[in-house]
Amino acid sequence: MTEKQNSAIKPDLELLTHRYSDHYEGFAMYDAREIDYPVYRTKVMYAVTKERKIHPVIISVLKTIHFLETLKDEDSYSYLQNISQLDEEILDTILADITTKGYLKQNDIRQEELKLSKEGKEILEKETELVTENASSWLYFDGIFGTVLEDTEKLDQKSREGAIEFKPYVKSRPRTECLDDDFSDNKTLRQVIIENLQDGNDITDIFEVAPGKFFRRHICLFYKDEETNEKFLVLNKDYEEDFRATQLFDRILNEQKFDYENISPNSVKIFEENIEKFNNTTPEIIKEKIQPIEEVSISDGKTIEVDEHKKYFIYVFENARNSIYIQSPWINWKTLRLYKEYIQNAVKKGVKVTVKYGMKPRNRFDKIIDKESQKFFDSLGKDNFRLIKTDDHSKIVICDDEFMIMGSFNWFSFGGGNEPDARGETSTINMNKDEILKQIEKFN
């Protein structure tokens, strides 16, 4: 993947900020970041000994030798050749092989009587033998804790600009020379490898451990409560909660590994921005952010910050008695689906909902409204819902004729871009009746 391609798929952190701002009760989200987490993709070369059935031809030769022992004939080789009807060269190869394995007594196979050794008699009885083979497998090691990872989804060789990059712990790097050193969970590296390889119980030796450093990309959301407790929420590529990764980051937090010492020098500036956001999110700010929807403050001139819009939007749907007017230039399903049930409930209880959208496309890829959103709006019917296409960049929400919210927030498309961090968006509440009626007229 080229550097240009790599930078073109950054996660939609705006949408994540909006969608998960109230995920933890009593906690306010103060930041959203990409985290590049170190993983050692490691090739392990080893010897494995397994029990294997002996080839029928070899069994036949061993049985014949065992039979010839009872004849007390010194020329057992000639008898064996006549009975087996094997080519002389092939027979010699077989006899040399089973002699090397210790199944025959160490005699000249051409000159003396052929006799099975003790080991030869034992394997003839079982018809199986232990065979040692060289093998190789891949293991993926957590670069911080040294544990073996089950999930081997796509890894990246380089950390991405704009992400917080964790440095791997030196002792968590799997190396050949450290096979018998303490590695993780009070186990040596050798023990960890043997426990995690498919044929671990049969491994007799490990020749080489060859790690390569890679990164697993996470989307991490940061939360803080009024007592300065912190929580993480880690998401997968589909923007859904990754429970295992979230538990991993909680462990990092609990073991105090999220600090300057463990952050790559390349991402110190980004890490400092994260710390600054943590410090600037005061108890007063948190208290306001986590305020229940039913307790939101509706007052003339109040400023609504970026992550408060969701709460106020829901408040409108739950409290409007007669009508709701919404103007949002772009509409996408990623955002609209957050309010799907609230819109349906408002329409069902008889509130008339009018949505006005539309802007001149910015480019050929710019979708003013996507198919999923259009399909949802069509499902609402026409009795209490109207969809109006226009060409207007305004962003407005009006609740009955009581108050309206105006500002820069795109109500149904916030998160439509791929900026490296959630942008600032603010709106204000206006309770001037005349101004509200003027805006309502524009929807007719």
Image (spheres, rainbow, N blue to C red):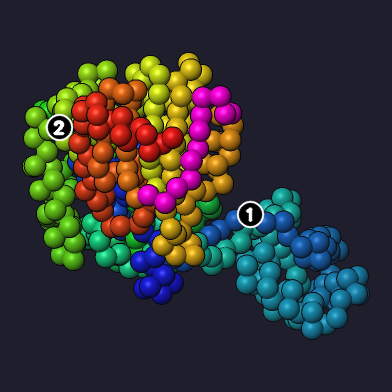
Q: Name the quadrant containing residue 224.
A: top left
Quarter of the figure that contains the C terminus: top left
Q: Which residue is mark 1?
A: 51
Q: Residue at x 38, y 38 (%)?
A: 442
Q: Disc 2 to disc 1, how far (Cα)?
A: 81 Å
| Crowdedness near tag 1: few (<14), some (14–19) or many (≥20) residues, C-alpha within 10 Å | few
Q: Is 62 drawn above or below residue 197 in the view shown?
A: below
Q: Residue furthest bottom?
A: 89
Q: Is 233 drawn above or below residue 73 in the view shown?
A: above
- On the question of residue 69 being in view, the answer is no
Give 273 or 404, whichever is nearer the viewer: 404
Disc 2 vs disc 1: which is toward the camera? 2
Mark found first going from the N terminus, 2 or 1 = 1
Callout 2 amino acid: Gly
Membership of 112 in magenta stretch: no
Callout 1 amino acid: Glu
- Counting from the top left corner in percent of width and height, residue 116 is at 71, 63
Q: Residue at x 23, y 57 (%)?
A: 164
- Counting from the top left corner in percent of width and height, residue 399 is at 33, 25
Give 124 or 14, whichever is nearer the viewer: 14
The region drawn magenta spans: 381-392
Look at the numbered disc 2 and give the secondary structure of its residue: loop
Membership of 390 in magenta stretch: yes
Q: Which residue is mark 2?
A: 301
Q: Name the quadrant containing residue 74.
A: bottom right
Look at the numbered disc 1 and give the secondary structure of its residue: strand
Q: Residue at x 16, y 35 (%)?
A: 303
